[in-house]
Image (spheres, rainbow, N blue to C red):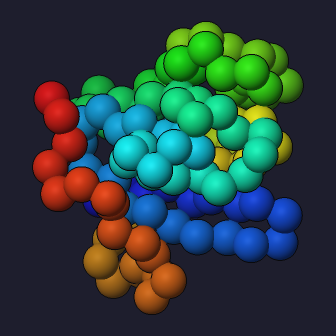
Amino acid sequence: MVFLEIRTGSRSRRVHLDEGTWLVGRAPHCDVVLADPSVSRQHFQIRIGPEGVEVEDMGSRHGLWLDGFRVQVAELPLGRWFLAGKVALQVHRGTTDDRDPAAIPPRKATPEP
């Protein structure tokens, strides 16, 4: 089970993500909505597969940042923090046993292949 940890200022939430491609941004049609003005309407995609996690900037204004560098496409090591605008995010594995009661289910039932 994979979780996306989202931190905006002092607020934090977790979103469960299944394998597939997820669109992340400010627009209401995104799979994961980030309501922050530094986030573009369609900021980035995150692809979760058996071989790992990849992020891709979708042409955002404030960029996608990993290890202090602006990236277009990057393999994302689990547990590594990255930035979308001013929002800090982290992908990590977990189990239903350690699932946070505040974890938010994904907006769509089945990710696109």
Residue 29, how many percent across, how many down? 38, 45
* Residue 53 visible: no
Can residue 40 be seen by looking at this rendering? Answer: yes
Residue 67 falls in image quadrant: top right
Instruction: Work out whether 99 lies above or below 40.
Output: below
Which percent across, then down, holds residue 95?
Answer: 32, 71
**86 to 6, vertically: above or below:** above
Corner quadrant of residue 111? top left
Q: Residue at x 64, y 42 (%)?
A: 80
Residue drawn at 51 percent across, 43 percent down = 27
Where 113 falls versus 89 (above or below)?
Answer: above
- At x 46%, y 50%, the residue is 28
Q: Nearer the viewer, residue 84 or 101?
A: 84
> Is 100 in front, or is 50?
100
For this view, does 65 lie left or right of residue 2? right
Q: Quadrant of the C terminus?
A: top left
Number of numbered discs visible in the structure rendering: 0
Q: Position of residue 101 (x, y in %)?
A: 45, 88
Left or right, 60 with respect to 67, comes to left
For this orientation, the residue located farthest to the bottom is 101
Q: Percent from the top left, x then y, of residue 58? A: 54, 18
Quadrant (top left/top right/bottom left/bottom right) for the N terminus: bottom left
Q: Residue at x 30, y 33 (%)?
A: 21
Q: Is residue 67 above or below residue 58?
A: below
